[in-house]
């Protein structure tokens, strides 16, 4: 497994520039990207598993009907 490291300021700027370009070309993605970035599973208190499968309290969207 790859060890986690914080991104550098240069990498952060490259990411911001790339995201800006993508949103300029595809403005409909703004809502989806915002949802991804604001996902509470990315918060430290959800970082208890090795993979991103932590449940969100009260989230039942994964259940079949």
Image (cartoon, rainbow, N blue to C red):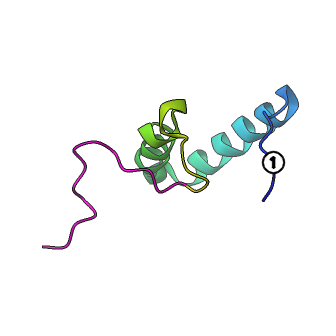
Residue furthest to the top in view is 9
Can residue 57 be found in the magenta stretch? yes
Residue furthest to the front in view is 48
Q: Give the range drawn in magenta.
A: 52-65
Residue 15, percent across and down? 74, 40
- Which residue is drawn at the image coordinates 61% and 53% (left, top)? 50
- The residue wearing badge 1 is 3
Q: What element carries label 1?
A: loop
Q: Quadrant of the image for the C terminus? A: bottom left
Q: Is residue 4 left or right of residue 38?
A: right
Q: Is residue 32 visible?
A: yes
Asked where in the image residue 17 lies, by quadrant, the reply is top right
Mark 1 surroundings within 10 Å by alpha-carbon count, few (fewer than 14), some (14 through 19), many (20 or more): few
SS assignment for the magenta stretch, majority: loop
Residue furthest to the bottom in view is 65
Q: In this view, does 39 lie to the left or right of 14?
A: left
Residue 45, percent across and down? 49, 32
Q: In this view, does 57 lie above or below 8?
A: below
Q: Nearer the viewer, residue 24 or 17?
A: 17
Residue 24, percent across and down? 59, 46
Residue 6, percent across and down? 78, 33
- Which residue is drawn at the image coordinates 55% and 31% (left, top)? 44
- Which residue is drawn at the image coordinates 58% and 56% (left, top)? 51
């Amino acid at each position: 497994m790859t060890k986690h490291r914080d991104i550098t300021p240069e990498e952060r700027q490259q990411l911001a520039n790339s995201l800006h370009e993508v949103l300029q070309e595809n403005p409909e993605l703004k809502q989806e990207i915002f949802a991804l970035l604001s996902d509470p599973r990315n918060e430290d208190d959800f970082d208890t598993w090795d993979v991103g499968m932590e449940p969100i309290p009260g989230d039942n969207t994964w259940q079949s009907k």
